[in-house]
Image: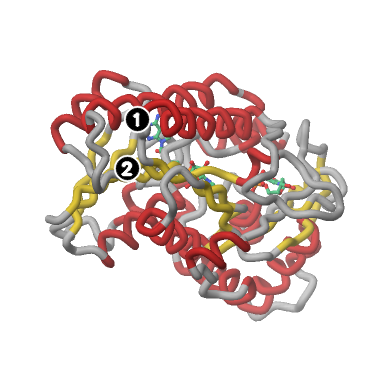
Amino acid sequence: MSKTILITGGAGFIGSHVVREFVLKYPEYQIINLDALTYAGNLENLKDIEACANYRFIKADITDQGLILELFQQYQPDGIIHLAAESHVDRSITDPSAFVMTNVIGTVNLLNAAKEIWKNNFEGKRFHHVSTDEVYGTLGETGLFKETTSYDPHSPYSASKASSDHFVRAYHDTYGLPIVITNCSNNYGPNHFPEKLIPLCIHNILNNRPLPIYGDGKFTRDWLFVIDHAKAIDLVFHQGKNGDSYNVGGFNEWKNIDLVKELCRQVDEKLNRATGTADQLITFVKDRPGHDLRYAIDATKINQELGYQPSVTFEQGLSITIDWFLQNQDWLDSVTSGDYQNYYKKQYH
Ligand code: NAD
Ligand code: TYD
């Protein structure tokens, strides 16, 4: 094996696509997936590659400083791709401390462990921190987030991610740790946990339940297909400039209400029903506190410096996503049983 790459959060939505991309594309790498398997982690997401010779899963919590150092000493990773996080804004509003623990303390534990085992010999080493565009706060009706945009987080989630980004940069500036950061826009695709807008609406359409739209539905997000995010991570991990950050997106802004209507249209079409059937489920509900109006990524840097281009259009990506959910209703049923029901009741009733 030419390199050992440790991917945190590899059982989650984006992490599972990153693990698959690396396991299949780099048979010469040993890929270690380190994940605590919280409510959002699911090894079913990786069933197709779990028997690959270059893949190994370790159940561990990144908030456990001692265990993380021990594992780093044992496996001596050359590269870290860090995705493990608490990732849902609404949950961060009800329980901010969990976000500080995993997203801030957990990240610092990983940085310390990398610094300890690499011992200032950084040749061939890389710590890739996967972050979000939400650290930049909100845009008005115009403008785009650039890598130089000041951080201005508003939710406990984005504040914890912003804090972790600052620590990652601080370890580069202070100790010379070789780092890169990617700040990506909203992802969608197969295996998306149905607490987030798109999979929640697909799940609710399939169960004939209301589609809850916060506020007036005019909030705007910039959507990227998850496999295109995984490809961007591969590119930046291998070719990104040490110490730099890269915004990742596909110039694909949608107001929530327009997006949900397009989703309804495609689901009706795939189920051979009259257009407008799913639309009737749209229900405007109380707004999210501190709701950011608009996110939009300027992806010029990653495009010009690394030649990055998304591989699918939004229409193609959404169609693949809906097909996946229609064909994997067992997966949806299993992740929405148990605790999800309590979460849903608390959040929406
Ligand atoms: P997710 O919630 O689907 O998955 C998170 C994974 O991390 C799960 O497998 C979970 O078990 C694991 N995890 C959580 N706490 C842990 C801990 N203490 N120790 C070890 N593992 C732990 O999240 P996601 O949507 O796949 O996001 C992955 C990363 O990408 C996050 O860092 C997130 O901030 C970032 N990101 C997400 C989006 C998006 O649209 N979802 C966009 C940009 C960036
Ligand atoms: P979400 O998928 O939670 O991602 P994020 O908050 O990280 O952008 O939400 C996407 C958008 O959809 C956001 O503006 C909030 C809105 N939203 C709803 O209107 N209803 C919902 O039930 C959810 C979960 C989100």
For badge 1, the amino acid type reads: Leu
Report the quarter where the N terminus lies: bottom left
Which residue is more in the foreground, 36 or 294? Answer: 294
Q: Which residue is mark 1?
A: 110
Q: Residues within 10 Å of mark 1 (few under 14, many from 20)?
A: many
Q: Residue at x 76, y 56 (%)?
A: 256
Residue 80 % position (x, y): 32, 42
Other-residue count near label 2 (Cα within 10 Å), few / some / many at <14 / 14–19 / ≥20: many
Q: Is residue 334 visible?
A: no
Please state if 161 lies on the left or on the right of 94 as rendered. left
Secondary structure under tag 2 reads: strand
Amino acid at pointer 2: Ile
Question: Residue 261: image x %, image y %?
Answer: 77, 65
Badge 2 vs badge 1, beta-carbon distance below 8 Å: yes
Q: Nearer the viewer, residue 324 or 295?
A: 295
- Which numbered disc covers residue 275? none
Task: Look at mark 2 in the image and give the residue it sits on.
Answer: 80
